[in-house]
Image: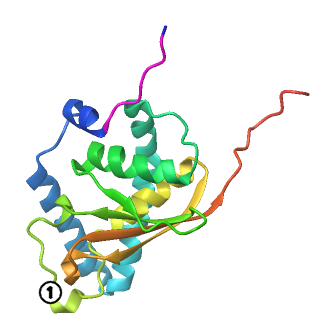
Amino acid sequence: MAPVAPRSGDAIFANIERVNAELFTLTYGAIVRQLLTDLEEVEEVNKQLEQMGYNIGIRLIDEFLAKSNVSRCVDFRETADVIAKVGFKMFLGVTASVSNWDAEGTCCSIILEDNPLVDFVELPDTCQGLYYCNILSGVIRGALEMVSMKTEVTWIRDVLRGDDVFELQVKLLKQVPEEYPYKDDE
């Protein structure tokens, strides 16, 4: 039997069960608003959104791997490309691009022209330090950690802050070797 070919983000998105985009956007907005009310400090909200994303990412990677048929990526460059072209399309319905690689190939930018999380959103002056989509940085960090990549994900540009695009910087801190619970030679 021939191996199953990896599926493109478009093919997966076409066949995946979806929730209404407006419902999703408004629900996320309600979560952020409630965090702002409960925590009061914008920096604490940023941390909480990132942690929520991390918790989602460590679970979402299983669904991604099961539905995308993506094999093990050769290097960090390929991993970033799969996140941008397949992952974002599969879960958010948008395609991102990867650019601004450093010389070592351990740091890049993922650029989103469109972000469904920010439909209907305007940040008030009291929330100028808020990274409204910080949940996405946590999702990427959590998912990559589950495939043995310790990363740091930070926002560089944000349309809600007046920039022209959304830009996430993803930096590979270290490739963690896989550990097995037992040894076969004993």
Residue 52 can be seen, yes or no: no
Which image quarter is the C terminus in?
top right
Displayed quadrant of residue 60 = top left
Q: Which residue is mark 1?
A: 124
Viewer-proximal residue, 135 or 93? Answer: 93
Chief secondary structure of the magenta portion: loop
Estimate the x, y position of residue 70 in percent, counting from the top left: 45, 34
Displayed quadrant of residue 128 = bottom left
Estimate the x, y position of residue 110 in percent, counting from the top left: 37, 62
- Assess whether residue 32 is covered by the magenta stretch: no
Viewer-proximal residue, 96 or 133? Answer: 96
Q: Residue furthest right?
A: 186
Q: Residue at x 79, y 34 (%)?
A: 182
Task: Examine the rendered structure and indicate whether residue 66 appears above or below residue 163.
Answer: above
- Assess whether residue 7 is covered by the magenta stretch: yes
Span shown in magenta = 2-8
Q: Residue at x 19, y 83 (%)?
A: 162
Amino acid beneath label 1: Pro
Q: Residue furthest top?
A: 1
Task: Examine the rendered structure and indicate whether residue 5 appears above or below residue 46.
Answer: above
Label tally:
1
Task: Examine the rendered structure and indicate whether residue 121 appears above or below residue 94.
Answer: below
Label 1, secondary structure: give it: loop
